Image (cartoon, grey):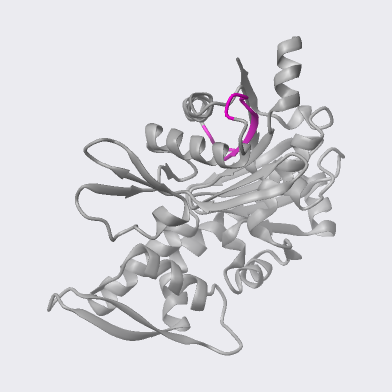
Amino acid sequence: MFLDSLMGFFSTDVAMDLGTANTLVWVKGRGIVLNEPSVVAVEKSTNRVLAVGSEAKLMLGRTPDEINAVRPLKDGVIADFQVTEHLLREFVHRVQKHKFLVRPRIIICVPSGITEVEKRAVIDSAVRAGCREVLLVPEPIAAAIGVDLPVDTPTGNMVVDIGGGTTEIAVIALNGIVTKTSIRTGGDEMDEAIANYAKKAYNMLIGEQTAERIKIEIGSAFPLPEEMDMEIKGRDLVRGIPRTLRVSSVEIREALQEPVGQIVNALRESLERTPPELAADIVDRGIYMTGGGALLRGLDLLMREVTNLNIRVAQDPLTCVVRGAGKILEKLEDYEKVILSGHRD
């Protein structure tokens, strides 16, 4: 017991939003200290880690045969156990500064639809990466706390958290999730839809990073006051040579119809399953959108048109989940009920 409290005194407790696209880390008393892509570059022959985060992301789609740049998380859960461990260890070391001998306590945010096996994989990865205590928190609850919603009251609060791999829709009351819908559609599926559109419409192959750039620069879910266009570069599938062309925001909106439609349908389904008393609260309070996907132009307007409810995009939606996890970390006793499960050495 004494040793545990001594470890707690010396260690840097961290909260982590372990995302499919990006990983954000909050350190107790310091706030957000790290925001990096969830990418690891590994040398195939020796399994040696060459780069993690931004440096590794630059290598995506550009590596020689002997180097593998991978995103170890798919649809919000671990797809590659060993590489995730490297990712966690590297990020924990970066924020621990020089405290290599002291193992931290960590809170990790996970999708609400996670299975017991997937939970175990996250906990095991964190323990093997050097954490002494691992606590899991559902992403929608962390997002709601990050937006300063009163999750401990009987009032219903609805959050739509659109990440890289999943969209989490939840109605929260009394520190728990009353109804939840977790679909494995997010920013990655939007990028994929753009790449597929370029292939079908123009016989052009574009990379994952190009598709992401198109989504950020001209992507939209609702007609824009002023439509935009941009120049994209890729490989002509017919002639096999590089080429350039211009695409418009109207075409990209068409390309995004399927993933955006899936998110809107999930919201509709979630509202249908909400108990009437809480549905009345949502009419009064509106729905909060968080996560990187909330930045897609016009998505809030489309949802408003479909649901006829007030849709609010959170301030800095990308950091809502980790900010909420940070608040839980700072006041663990107050938020004990929101913790999903945990592991202690």
Left or right: 57 in relation to 240: right
- Residue sitting at x 41%, y 72%: 255
- Residue sitting at x 77%, y 27%: 336
Which residue is farthest front? 98
Q: Is residue 272 visible?
A: no
Residue 141 is situated, as x and y percent measured from the top left of the image, at 71, 42
In this orientation, which residue lies closer to the viewer: 278 or 221? 221
Residue 245 is situated, as x and y percent measured from the top left of the image, at 31, 85
In this orientation, which residue lies closer to the viewer: 235 or 192? 235
Which residue is farthest bottom? 226
In this orientation, which residue lies closer to the viewer: 105 or 258? 105
Q: Is residue 7 above or below residue 267?
A: above
Which residue is farthest left? 239
- Residue sitting at x 61%, y 41%: 95
In this orientation, which residue lies closer to the viewer: 222 or 314? 314
Left or right: 18 in relation to 237: right
Residue 297 is situated, as x and y percent measured from the top left of the image, at 59, 73
Quadrant of the rendering where the N terminus is positioned: top right
On the image, which quarter does residue 291 sit in? bottom right
- Residue sitting at x 44%, y 74%: 214
Q: Is residue 7 visible?
A: yes
Q: Is residue 95 above or below residue 204?
A: above
- Main secondary structure along the magenta-highlighted residues: loop
* Residue 198 on the magenta segment: no
Quadrant of the rendering where the C terminus is positioned: top right
The range drawn in magenta is 100-114
Q: Is residue 250 above or below residue 135?
A: below
Number of labels in the image equals 0
Residue 209 is situated, as x and y percent measured from the top left of the image, at 39, 65
Q: Is residue 334 above or below residue 75?
A: above
